Image: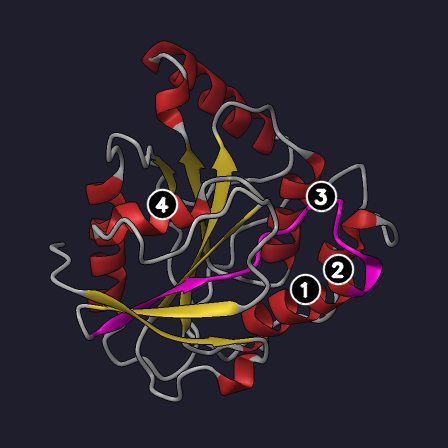
């Protein structure tokens, strides 16, 4: 896919006030300081479209960017920033959950993971929460340029291997670098494929990945309570067949 133009449209804290049209929305989320804004800028080819900040946890709103006048990139608040106040954490919980579970236009959620790190509990629990709620998502490993090619492949392969302890199958996986543009074409081509597959958007496509039973249930309190299961999608929404891992 060629990106000809991209522009900021609106910021909201209430998903019901997001754009009313039925264009596809591709949302991006991850832990604070995972490189989300840089990735969005890399995908759109605009260095300052999504504002980057030296302060982790700066994004507190749902930000919509219209790409090629046909689909949206949605920048969601990051999670896992310990220095936020309790009130801010509860507010963000509401923003994130309401958008992910209630926004029919959200075609896919890209979950960003820092490729340098071993699996973090909060990321794993978040993806389990997505699976239990039938949310279509993909994994985007960021900052692949921060390590050698061999180390990056080894680290991400080990990450996915650990996921298979919980998951029966994995969502699509992308390895990216905002510094050198790695993975840009793969992510954009995937979005283009999804746009074509769901041209008649009238409800949310949901990726119902088979989720194996885990010996450790999700905690019901503490930091991980943001991602504990609360409700699920109705079964009458169209589903997307699971795609093989990239």
Q: Mark 4: give few (<14), some (14-19) or many (20+) Cα within 10 Å.
A: many
Q: Which residue is mark 2?
A: 89
Spot the residue most to the front. Answer: 54
Mark 4–mark 1 distance (CA, rounded to whole Å): 21 Å
Which one is closest to the eye, mark 1 or mark 3? 1
Asked whether 75 falls inside the magenta stretch, the response is yes
Residues at badges 1 and 2 in contact (C-beta under 8 Å)?
Answer: yes
3D distance between C-alphas at marks 1 and 3? 29 Å
> What is the quadrant of residue 196 in the picture?
bottom left
Disc nearer the start of the sequence (1/3): 1
- Asked whether residue 229 is in view, the answer is no
Determine the secondary structure under disc 3: loop
Q: Are marks 1 and 3 in contact (CB under 8 Å)?
A: no
Query: Mark 1 or mark 4, which is nearer the start of the sequence?
Result: 4
Q: Residue at x 86, y 49 (%)?
A: 222
Report whether 202 appears left or right of 86.
left
Of marks 3 and 2, the one in the foreground: 2
């Amino acid at each position: 896919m060629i990106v000809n133009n991209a522009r900021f449209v609106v910021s909201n804290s209430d998903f019901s006030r997001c754009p009313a049209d039925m264009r596809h929305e591709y949302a991006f989320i991850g832990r604070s300081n995972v490189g989300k804004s840089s990735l969005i800028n890399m995908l759109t080819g605009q260095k300052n479209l999504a504002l980057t900040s030296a302060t982790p946890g700066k994004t507190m709103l749902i930000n919509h960017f219209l790409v090629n006048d046909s689909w949206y990139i949605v920048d969601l608040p990051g999670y896992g920033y310990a220095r936020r106040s309790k009130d801010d954490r509860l507010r963000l919980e509401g923003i994130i959950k309401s958008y992910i579970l209630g926004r029919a236009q959200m075609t896919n959620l890209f979950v960003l993971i820092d490729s340098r790190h071993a699996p973090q509990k909060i990321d794993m629990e978040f993806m389990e929460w997505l699976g239990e709620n039938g949310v279509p998502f993909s994994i985007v490993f960021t900052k692949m340029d921060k390590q050698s090619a061999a180390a990056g492949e080894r680290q991400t392969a080990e990450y996915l291997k650990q996921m298979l302890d919980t998951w029966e199958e994995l969502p699509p996986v992308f390895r990216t670098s905002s510094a050198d543009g790695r993975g840009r074409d793969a992510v954009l081509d995937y979005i283009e494929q999804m746009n074509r597959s769901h041209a008649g958007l009238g409800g949310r496509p949901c990726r119902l990945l088979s989720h194996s039973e885990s010996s450790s249930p999700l905690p019901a309190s503490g930091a991980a309570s943001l991602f504990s299961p609360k409700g699920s999608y109705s079964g009458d929404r169209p589903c997307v067949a699971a795609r093989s891992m990239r």
